[in-house]
Image (cartoon, helix red, strand yellow):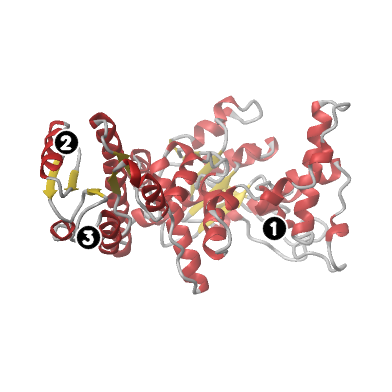
Amino acid sequence: MRGTILLVDDEPMILHSTEQWLKMADFTVISCESAEQALVYLEDDFDGILVSDVRMPDMDGLVLMERARLLISELPVILLTGHGDVDMAINAMRSGAYDFIEKPFNPERLVEVIHRACEKRQLMIENLRLQHNMSIQSGIDTRIIGISPSIQRLRRDVLKCAALETNVIIYGETGSGKELVAQCLHEYSQRSAHNFVPINCGAIPEALIESELFGHELGAFTGATKKRIGKFEYADNGTLFLDEIESMPAHLQIKILRALQERVIERLGGNRQISVNLRVVAASKVDLRTEEHFRQDLYYRLNVSFLHLPPLRDRQEDIPLLFEHYARQAVEQHSRELRRITEQDVATMQQYQWPGNVRELKNAAVRYALDGSLSLADTLFPKSSLQGLEPLINDSLSLAAQMANYEREIICQTLKKFNGNIKSVLDQLDLPRRTLNQKMVKYDINRQEFTLDDKPELGE
């Protein structure tokens, strides 16, 4: 069966003929000759939709719709209207009706609209079921959220990999949740009682990354005023997460390979070999097999198991659920009231491509939840984001030159927006620290020009 239809019409002949047509189309139909009779069926466990005539005695279809949606929030309601009721039906859609069909209607058109409404209703029920499960569970479903087949498969694969002691490579686009998956691999493994140690290989200056990974002894180099334990040593008996491993310098790839093969490291400036027992989870935006500068022997050492994270645009059924999850988190954290997400909002977010994946969605959900003046369209397409960039278009310049001007202006505007705070700029533009530094040198951008004072930024 395609779904359950609560059909309401005070004209018995129309009610009977419509019921017969819908049953032939494989719907389950509950027929009612009055709105009062229909309300009896609208209990919490009703999993169908409401199809009602507008003009009926005692209680018309518009009042029925209002009463029905009070009993079952977001219930899809389709209104059957006479020719003179079209304006009224349009107003009803603005108030939350799913659609309206003008009489005399084409039965095939009615079946098509009802079928879409039933699919929407089933998706809503599944989302509610998952939300309920999340509220009473503490398992992986509450960490890796979604109902799409690809996410259900990912959760199963994560649990399988977590039970093993093998190294893992996680592939996924920027913002798709690679670190979250790495955390789950650690938390559901036998190493969960020990440290999970993340490091972004692309965000650390090349001169410092070796010390970050392997540590250093006192006096190993200028500024080494005390001994420091590196990430490998700190992750002993736990999990080391190497994010953006494709950006790892070639000479360090050799040292990482040796550490994985022999399970020993040496701190910079030291000669003592230190045994380490850890699991390495690496993450990459690109296929490491095709990266010319990435050592194949290191690739095969890491690629015992691998996971692929689907981009958000390929799992649209997860988007409304994730959006509401992050919006709810934001309002609870700031003691605000949760905004109602409309059907138009759901359509907008499912049509959007989400180039920044879950990270972008989370930021949009927080902005939408905390700023009641913003529509979802304004949140996704801020009008101010392109203001002031029009003069950069110059037909006399090459495309490369125009793109460089555009890129420089975006960096400058973001620095200005965050008062020169580099960490905020990195988060906003989703850039590694090294890449931002290179671009600021390339475009002769001085951070101090965007600060309100001369105090050095923390960490610089």
As drawn, the residue found furthest toward the bottom would be 335
Q: Are marks 3 and 2 in contact (CB under 8 Å)?
A: no
- What residue is rendered at 75% in x and 65% in y? 458
Q: Is residue 393 visible?
A: yes
Disc 2 is placed on an element classified as helix
Front residue of 320/133: it is: 320
Look at label 3 and name its amino acid: Met
Left or right of 3 on screen, residue 273: right
Which is nearer the N-term, disc 1 or disc 3? 3
Q: Is residue 144 visible?
A: no
As drawn, the residue found furthest toward the front would be 84
Q: CA distance from mark 1 to mark 3?
A: 56 Å
Left or right of 30 on screen, residue 110: right
Disc 3 is placed on an element classified as loop
Which is nearer the N-term, disc 3 or disc 2? 2
Q: CA distance from mark 2 to mark 1?
A: 56 Å
Q: Which mark is residue 59?
A: 3
Reading the image, the residue beneath label 1 is 424
Q: Which mark is residue 240?
A: none
Reading the image, the residue beneath label 2 is 22
Left or right of 338 on screen, residue 373: right
Q: Are marks 2 and 1 in contact (CB under 8 Å)?
A: no
Camera-side mark, 2 or 1: 2
Please identify the quarter of the rendering in which residue 14 is found: top left
- What residue is rendered at 25% in x and 29% in y? 108
Q: Are marks 1 and 3 in contact (CB under 8 Å)?
A: no
Front residue of 442/105: it is: 105
